Image (cartoon, rainbow, N blue to C red):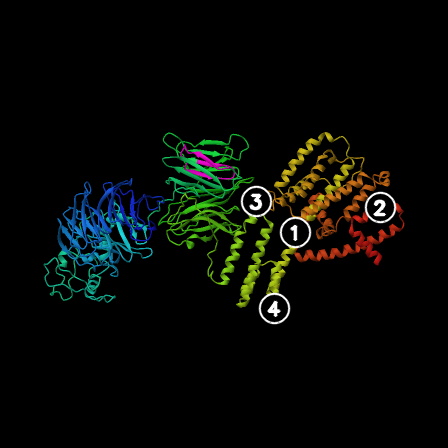
């Protein structure tokens, strides 16, 4: 089973770096070229403890709670661990110390230096020192044997201050920095040899026997003594099984940098390593080698037969490697013989040579070259081993916009409202709340006596939660600072055994997800609301307005994948689930790092690979990648910490983190702005750039439709400007496609254009002499024109239906006003209450007026003429007239309130602002109210003739006004022609039902039939007007002067009478 190589992270500044584990394996300790020793709790620890030991730190060793370092001030210092308190100076040199090492008991320290000397110092008494002289170059490495009898100071072996042997391993240099390899040797645990298989030929420690291309820089034995890890100058990490002489693991550095230090975890399951760039890495999952190495040996050998061995032995492989030849003398019994292979490739697949077999390496009796036979491995009982994909540990719950909870100074929340900081050290345990806009609220300082670890912040409240303890339950605390009363705080205890995992705030509500996979909703004032179960353990949540976004685990992942699911709920008047447990797309082997909403209310999230995705509502609620923050990072250890997303303007607000995933609290980090970019193909070309700009504009302006449908006020100027930019981009792409002779592509682009832009495209194609293209574009223009005309007809139908019902109702109300008796002022207060209620409903539902009119007409005949002496049945409810009049005036005032908020161009939305009514509706209502006022004026001052004959004159006047108020539409003319057929088919229908039935039939007509019918009826209408004008002219000649004055008043109300009179006079 291959081990897992963790991504490397920033540890120290560029230069030589060393690493080791403490004896318990809890801490990783490193030193580097910045002069600091850093103590890491894990590879993801972003706030390590550090100890400054000098300008530069070259080496370190840790044993028995003592930390020894070799620094650039020519000293070897000792500190306590893990406190880091100075404990004195062990020894000094005349130049820099290069390497330090403890013996097995931790009582002595050996230190090598660039002044060619080695000193052995007693830890308890630094005055007891021994100096070893005799080296002819700077000392690269020092190490004790497990029995404390020998000391290897590269390149010599010492025994009791006596130099036993010296190996010419490397070319001598005058400085450590010029050496081709550090040549860090290591004793096998429990053995009195540097390496059990390399004692006779120490050159094996210098060459990577597998790749034969680079020097081995460092080696390290596993705690069990069975595995040997090596790091090369070329960045190759190799793990060898000494018993089977096989390479069981091989990893390549991410960037090919030199590996300068290795350290095994005390359990043998991990290897920490560092490179010359100051980065720290980790190999995890090495414990599986112990159980699988024996089986791997047999499986590996079965891949080759004897013929393959012979080919390799004879040097006839595909690489044409020459046969290894001895370069030393003929004395095979001399242990000091030094054999130099012609290449780094050995003839045996076991990469480590055996002592007994290597002594006969140069035997002349074997013509084809002797084969090294590996020693038999110790029998180990075989166990069934699972070799399939390994499950991925599930991601723990976190709060978006917060840093890890183990940090003493951390951000508990950073969003578009403000910042919540948490401090948990020896001096203070508190929470500071800061608002970006001080007009929302002033800064607050809270004592964190309950130990809150989760927080969220909105423009209404602050929500905090703490985990449970043995004595106390998990608590939810809310500071409702926007409340108008004096008691602004409430607290809730969760049930026993239930801990808060994630929480969020919305507009008027708060949500908390617990460890029992339960989600609890509260009002912002503390009232418990809905409660429901989640399908899996929660990962995080986010809220915005009436929307709640939940991410949870849907299954167990494998091979580093995190199978997450997402739910999107919308509250308000109609609660519904927009996204129901759909899988959340993530990058390969990544996890979720941030979740939230844009300032305009669109869900979005970021994964650990830096990919930002946003919800595309226009494409079936799919997720579209819009940015990759890793593309702007200078180093792989750098990251961007996202704090907010804006769609208009298109901005990704984040904090750059150097060598870390999270920013420090002090000094306050600066927020950077990154642009969005869709990952389309060939974005370096002009075509790709315009395509990316167009679809990005379409995606980031979809929120206008969502906000408009949700009842929010939108910026119509911004929406129109975005549509204009999109059409300009389409026209540019059209011109580019014409230049490239891509006429089919031009037609595809024209289908995305509006009717006006298609007309421009036709002109462009005609001037370019592309007549076939212009012909096809004209067909598209006709289709779009018919679509626009059909939409206009539908609008006219709705308008005519609304106006006819409104007009009939207005006539009936005027008749009711004439027969009303005085003395109803006692019901004034009740009418005002009903008017306020109707006004509120009208704001919430734009079509409430039309619905109320249709419902109130009911089965009554709107065309029935009643006399003044007989009150109608509806006159018993005089409040209806006042309510409708009030609603008419309120609809006119609605756009004023909307325009008052337009000067504020802030991207932050004003929630629940009513949408301004369209110009058509406002104009229609205004005309209706003006005409109704004119009619009331005429009714309050009747003419003498009307007073004498009240039963005849008012109906005639109403009929004239009804006929001449406005020209009839195509639907009204069609209704007059087909009314009899509709009544004949369904004689039981009332008047309103007849209108509805006529509307349904008229909609089934095609656009051509509607146009023909309208033209035919318009001709009939003109002839009727001409005839009516002639009759009116004859009647005018025989009327009195008073009748002429009244006729002039009637004609002034209707322009159609003027046209008919003009036609009559002309004839």
C-alpha gap between disc 1 and disc 3: 23 Å
**Residue pointed to by mark 4:** 767
**Contact between labelled residues 1 and 2, with CB atoms less than 8 Å apart:** no
C-alpha gap between disc 4 and disc 1: 36 Å
The residue lying toward the viewer, choosing from 827 and 117, is 117
Sequence-wise, which precedes: disc 1 or disc 3?
A: 3
Viewer-nearest of labels 4 and 1? Answer: 4
**Contact between labelled residues 4 and 2, with CB atoms less than 8 Å apart:** no
**Residue pointed to by mark 1:** 794
Query: Which residue is at 60% across, 61% downward?
Result: 758
Q: Confirm whether residue 798 shows in the render.
A: no
Q: In which quadrant of the rendered view does residue 827 lie?
A: top right
- Mark 2 burial class by Cα count in 10 Å: few <14, some 14-19, many 20+: few
Residue 450 lies within the magenta run: yes
Image location of residue 227, percent across then percent down: 22, 50
Residue 362 lies within the magenta run: no
- Mark 3 burial class by Cα count in 10 Å: few <14, some 14-19, many 20+: some
Mark linked to residue 1046: 2
Image location of residue 415, percent across then percent down: 47, 43
- Check disc 1 and report its element: helix, strand or loop: helix
Query: Which residue is at 86% across, 52% downward?
Result: 1033
Mark linked to residue 710: 3
The residue lying toward the viewer, choosing from 520 and 126, is 126
Sequence-wise, which precedes: disc 2 or disc 3?
A: 3
In the image, is residue 805 above or below residue 689?
A: above
Sequence-wise, which precedes: disc 3 or disc 4?
A: 3
C-alpha gap between disc 3 and disc 4: 45 Å
- Check disc 2 and report its element: helix, strand or loop: helix
- Mark 4 burial class by Cα count in 10 Å: few <14, some 14-19, many 20+: few
Image location of residue 1025, percent across then percent down: 80, 54
The residue lying toward the viewer, choosing from 957 and 212, is 212
- Check disc 4 and report its element: helix, strand or loop: helix
């Amino acid at each position: 089973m291959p081990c897992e190589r963790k991504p490397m992270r920033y540890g120290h500044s560029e230069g030589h770096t060393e690493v080791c584990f403490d004896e318990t394996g809890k801490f990783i300790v490193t030193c580097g070229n910045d002069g600091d020793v850093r103590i890491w709790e894990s590879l993801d620890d972003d706030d390590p403890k550090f100890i400054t030991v000098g300008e530069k730190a070259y080496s370190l060793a840790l044993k028995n709670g003592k930390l020894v370092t070799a620094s650039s001030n020519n000293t070897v210092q000792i500190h306590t661990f893990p406190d880091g308190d100075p404990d004195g100076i062990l020894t000094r040199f005349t130049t820099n110390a290069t390497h330090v090492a403890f013996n097995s008991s931790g009582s002595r320290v050996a230190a090598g230096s660039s002044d060619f000397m080695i000193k052995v110092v007693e830890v308890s008494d630094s005055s007891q020192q021994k100096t070893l002289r005799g080296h002819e170059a700077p000392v690269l490495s020092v190490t004790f044997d497990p029995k404390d009898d020998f000391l290897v100071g590269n390149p010599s072996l010492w025994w009791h201050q006596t130099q036993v042997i010296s190996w010419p391993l490397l070319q001598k240099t005058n400085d450590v920095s010029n050496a081709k390899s550090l040549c860090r040797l290591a004793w096998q645990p429990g053995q009195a040899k540097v390496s059990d298989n390399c004692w006779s030929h120490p050159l094996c420690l210098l060459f990577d026997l597998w790749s034969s291309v680079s020097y081995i820089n460092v080696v390290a034995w596993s705690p069990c003594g069975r595995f040997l890890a090596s790091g090369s100058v070329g960045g190759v990490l190799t793990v060898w099984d000494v018993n089977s002489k096989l390479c069981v693991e091989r990893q390549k550095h991410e960037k090919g940098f030199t590996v300068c230090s290795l350290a095994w975890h005390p359990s043998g399951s991990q290897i920490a390593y560092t490179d010359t760039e100051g980065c720290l890495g980790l190999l995890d999952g090495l414990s599986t080698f112990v159980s699988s190495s024996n089986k791997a040996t047999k499986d590996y050998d079965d891949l080759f037969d004897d013929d393959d061995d012979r080919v390799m032995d004879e040097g006839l492989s595909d690489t044409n490697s020459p046969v290894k030849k001895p370069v030393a003398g003929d004395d095979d019994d001399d242990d000091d013989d030094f054999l130099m292979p012609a290449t780094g490739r050995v003839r045996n697949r076991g990469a480590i040579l055996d002592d007994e077999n290597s002594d006969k390496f140069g035997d002349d009796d074997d013509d084809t070259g002797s084969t090294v036979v590996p020693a038999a491995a110790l029998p180990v009982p075989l166990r069934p081993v699972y070799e399939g994909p390994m499950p991925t540990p599930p991601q723990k719950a976190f709060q978006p916009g917060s840093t890890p909870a183990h940090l003493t100074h951390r951000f508990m929340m950073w969003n578009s409202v403000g910042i919540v900081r948490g401090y948990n050290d020896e001096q203070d345990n508190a929470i500071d709340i800061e608002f970006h806009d001080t007009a929302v609220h002033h800064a607050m300082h809270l004592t964190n006596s309950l130990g809150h670890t989760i927080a969220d912040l909105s423009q209404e409240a602050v929500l905090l939660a703490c985990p449970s303890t043995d004595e106390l339950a998990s608590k939810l605390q809310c500071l409702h600072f926007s409340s108008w009363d004096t008691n602004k705080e409430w607290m809730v205890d969760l049930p026993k055994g239930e801990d808060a995992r994630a929480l969020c705030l919305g507009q008027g509500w708060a949500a908390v997800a617990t460890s029992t996979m339960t989600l609890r909703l509260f009002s912002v004032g503390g009232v418990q609301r809905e409660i429901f179960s989640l399908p899996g353990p929660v990962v995080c949540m986010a809220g915005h307005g009436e929307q709640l976004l939940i991410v949870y685990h849907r299954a167990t992942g494998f091979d580093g994948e995190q199978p997450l699911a997402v739910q999107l709920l919308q509250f308000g008047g109609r609660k519904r689930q927009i996204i129901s447990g759909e899988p959340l797309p993530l990058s390969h082997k990544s996890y979720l790092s941030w979740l939230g909403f844009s300032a305009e209310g669109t869900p979005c999230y970021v994964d650990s690979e830096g990919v930002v995705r946003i919800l595309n509502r226009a494409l079936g609620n799919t997720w579209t990648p819009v940015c990759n923050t890793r593309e702007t990072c200078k180093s792989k250890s750098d990251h961007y910490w996202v704090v907010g997303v804006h769609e208009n303007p298109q901005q990704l607000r984040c904090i750059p983190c150097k060598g870390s995933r999270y920013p420090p609290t002090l000094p306050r980090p600066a927020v950077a702005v990154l642009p969005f970019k869709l990952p389309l193909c060939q974005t370096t070309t002009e075509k790709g750039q315009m395509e990316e700009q167009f679809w990005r504009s379409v995606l980031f302006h979809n929120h206008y439709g969502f906000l408009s449908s949700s009842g929010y006020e939108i910026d119509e100027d911004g929406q129109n400007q975005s549509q204009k930019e999109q059409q300009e981009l389409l026209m540019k792409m059209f011109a580019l496609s014409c230049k490239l002779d891509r006429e089919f592509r031009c037609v595809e682009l024209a289908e995305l254009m509006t009717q006006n832009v298609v007309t421009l495209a036709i002109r462009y194609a005609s001037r370019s002499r592309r007549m076939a293209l212009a012909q096809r574009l004209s067909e598209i223009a006709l289709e779009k024109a018919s679509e626009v005309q059909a939409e206009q007809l539908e609008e006219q139908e709705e308008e005519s239906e609304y106006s006819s019902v409104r007009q009939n109702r207005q006539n009936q109300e005027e008749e009711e006003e004439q027969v009303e008796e005085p003395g109803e002022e006692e019901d004034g207060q009740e009418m005002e209450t009903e008017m306020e209620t109707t006004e509120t409903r009208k704001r919430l539902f734009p079509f409430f007026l039309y619905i109320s009119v249709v419902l109130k007409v009911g089965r009554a005949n709107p065309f029935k003429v009643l006399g003044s002496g007989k009150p109608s049945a509806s006159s018993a409810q005089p409040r209806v007239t006042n309510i409708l009049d009030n609603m008419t005036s309120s609809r006119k005032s609605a756009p004023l309130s909307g325009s008052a908020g337009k000067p504020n161009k802030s991207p932050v939305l004003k929630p629940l602002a009513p949408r301004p009514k369209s110009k058509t509706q406002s104009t229609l209502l205004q005309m209706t109210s003006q005409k109704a006022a004119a009619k009331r004026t005429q009714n309050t001052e009747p003419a003498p003739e009307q007073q004498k004959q009240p039963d005849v004159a008012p109906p005639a006047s109403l009929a004239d006004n009804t006929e001449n108020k406005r020209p009839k539409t195509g639907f009204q003319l069609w209704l007059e022609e087909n009314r009899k057929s509709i009544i004949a088919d369904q004689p039981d229908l009332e008047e309103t039902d007849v209108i509805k039935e006529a509307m349904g039939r008229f909609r089934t007509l095609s656009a051509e039939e509607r146009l023909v019918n309208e033209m035919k009826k318009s001709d009939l209408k003109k002839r009727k007007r001409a005839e009516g004008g002639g009759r009116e002219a004859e009647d005018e000649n025989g009327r009195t002067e008073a009748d002429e004055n009244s006729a002039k008043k009637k004609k002034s109300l209707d322009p159609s009478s003027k046209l008919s009179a003009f036609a009559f006079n002309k004839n």
